Amino acid sequence: MANIVIVGAQWGDEGKGKITDLLAEEADIVVRYQGGSNAGHTVKVGEEVFRLHHIPSGILYPGKLCIIADGMVVDPEVLKEEVEELVKRGLSVEGLRISLNAHIVMPYHRILDGIWEARMGKGRIGTTGRGIGPCYADKAARIGIRMSDLLVERLLKEKLAINLEEKNLIISHYRPDLPPLKMEDLLPRYLELGEFFRPYVVNTSQLIHQAMDEKKNILFEGAQGTLLDINYGTYPFVTSSHPIAGGVCIGAGIGPRRIDKVIGVCKAYITRVGEGPFPTEIIGEVGDYLRERGAEYGTTTGRPRRCGWLDLVALKHAVKVNGLDGLAITKLDVLTGLPKLKICVAYRIDGQETDVFPVDANLLKRCEPVYEELPGWERLEDVDDFADLPKEAQDYLRFISSYVALPICIVSLGPRREQTLGWRVRKEGYLWDRIVVDTVD
Ligand code: GDP
Ligand code: IMO
Ligand code: MG
């Protein structure tokens, strides 16, 4: 029995979907605790590719409970499509459970997202446009609509009336080209969506507590990443939730001492979608090489991802704010063919070197990366053992592990399950308890 948290250690898109799917085989329950349809988690099984936005990446195995917990914001239109797509492809969604408390992303949230971005002009965040910020803002303002409200006409009508009055004022001011949103359109549609989801809607934190009492294995699947956390990321270029491990407690309703292990997922390089400072960004040929080899285009928006060298200053920050116990390094294969690899080991700011990550975007913008150079490798076969990796790849992984003083527990060499060290020759014990590179190595 174990409660394992999987978090993004960078700016998102680290391969959390793949790692969650991999570990889900040995879990009973998989829980998403924050974010919403801004997330895009791609899971490749054989030649089939699944793209998940709300539904935990455990849904591909039969018999798992997949929970959308209290801290999430749900866009019911998108979630319905997601459910229907899975069913069309022959999968069961019987294990899906949605929290009564999850907030609902309404059509006006998506419009407001666009208005806020347009107003910020050059200072825009580059959001996914999915209405995430405005929905969390309404949650904090205590005027949000929750899953439970979609099940009771009177409640939904009352809350919609308050929101429509305010939102239509703003929309008509900034977007006079758009027609006002109408109660007679939204009320029946969202009641209908409520009916669609009624069989799945429950008190999910109670369900999680019960599962813990029954000593089940639970995986908590983070969305976005540490550097997008609204407190510990590069504010204001962040998302509006808490992707970090602490987000599990508030987003799923469990005490911090119930978490047994926190695994940080980290690419062998780093990417960012949207605006904001990015010290190790590579503009030019090598950046393009990583983008093409790594297929670095957004799962949710299709936007090209900005690519850069691995940033160990940022990773150390992620180790601390998440209390990471181990790392899952993904996409090592993508670096193959580059003769020299740079790794950022410090920042230089105003002539001083530091290895402390500044969470202020203005300060981060002024940081220059200090690099160490490591030799690359020419070929990287799909192997099962660390010892069969090229020596340069082994050294690259050892360098990461020793800098952050953490073991690497998973190394991924491709998008599929079997493209993971230690997957084919299965040994005793859970995959999440393995150590591929120890800190003392
Ligand atoms: P997430 O948001 O953290 O789940 O990551 P995304 O799914 O947005 O992006 C990761 C992409 O990399 C997906 O298309 C995965 O299929 C793919 N991927 C995951 N691990 C590996 C790997 O080790 N090597 C390669 N080449 N691709 C990977
Ligand atoms: P997964 O779970 C990468 C980024 C957006 C933007 C900022 C705010 O797939 O790793 P938002 O729409 O959340 O208000 O946008 O956060 N962003 C992500 N970047 N992966 C994600 O999710 C992201 N979700 C949001 O690009 O910079
Ligand atoms: Mg993604």
Image (tube, rainbow, N blue to C red):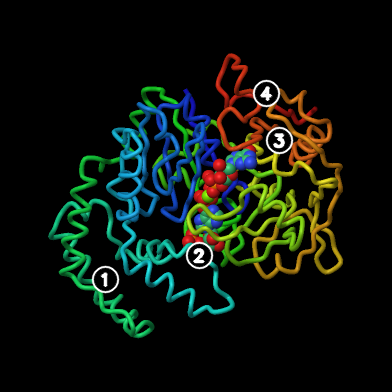
Q: Marks 1 and 3, Cα distance to the nearest angstrom?
A: 48 Å
User: Are circles 2 and 3 on residues that touch, CB within 8 Å?
Assistant: no
> For residue 127, which numbered disc appears in the image?
2
Name the kind of residue labelled 2 in the image. Answer: Thr
Task: Please say whether residue 324 is visible from this viewpoint.
Answer: no
Choose the circle earlier in sequence order: 4 or 1: 1
Instruction: Please tell me whether mark 2 or mark 3 is closer to you in this view.
Output: 2
Kindly indicate the quadrant of the structure image that contains residue 428.
Answer: top right
Location of mark 4 (residue): 384
Q: Gap in Å between the C-alphas at discs 3 and 4?
A: 21 Å
Q: What is the secondary structure assignment of the residue under circle 2?
A: loop
Asked if the beta carbon under badge 3 is closer than 8 A to the nearest atom of ligand 1, the reply is no
The local secondary structure at tag 1 comes to: helix
Which mark sits nearer the N-terminus, 3 or 4?
4
Disc 3 residue crowd, few under 14, some 14–19, many 20+, Cα 10 Å: many
Q: Return the residue found at the far front.
A: 47
Classify 97 as above or below 370. above
Q: Residue furthest top?
A: 428
Can residue 92 be seen in this snapshot? yes
Q: Does residue 97 appear to the left or right of 159 in the view shown?
A: right
Identity of the amino acid at label 1?
A: Asn
Kindly check if marks 3 and 4 are in contact, taking CB atoms under 8 A apart as contact: no
Counting residues from the N terminus, which is met first, the one under dot 1 or under dot 3?
1
**Residue 399 coordinates in the image, percent (x, y):** 80, 38
Give the residue at the far left of this rendering. Answer: 154
At numbered mark 3, what does the secondary structure look like: helix, strand or loop? loop
Check mark 2 vs ligand 2: CB closer than 8 Å? yes or no: yes
C-alpha distance separating marks 2 and 1 = 22 Å
Q: Nearer the viewer, mark 2 or mark 1?
A: 2
* 10 Å crowding of disc 4: few (<14), some (14-19), many (20+): some
Residue that label 1 marks: 163
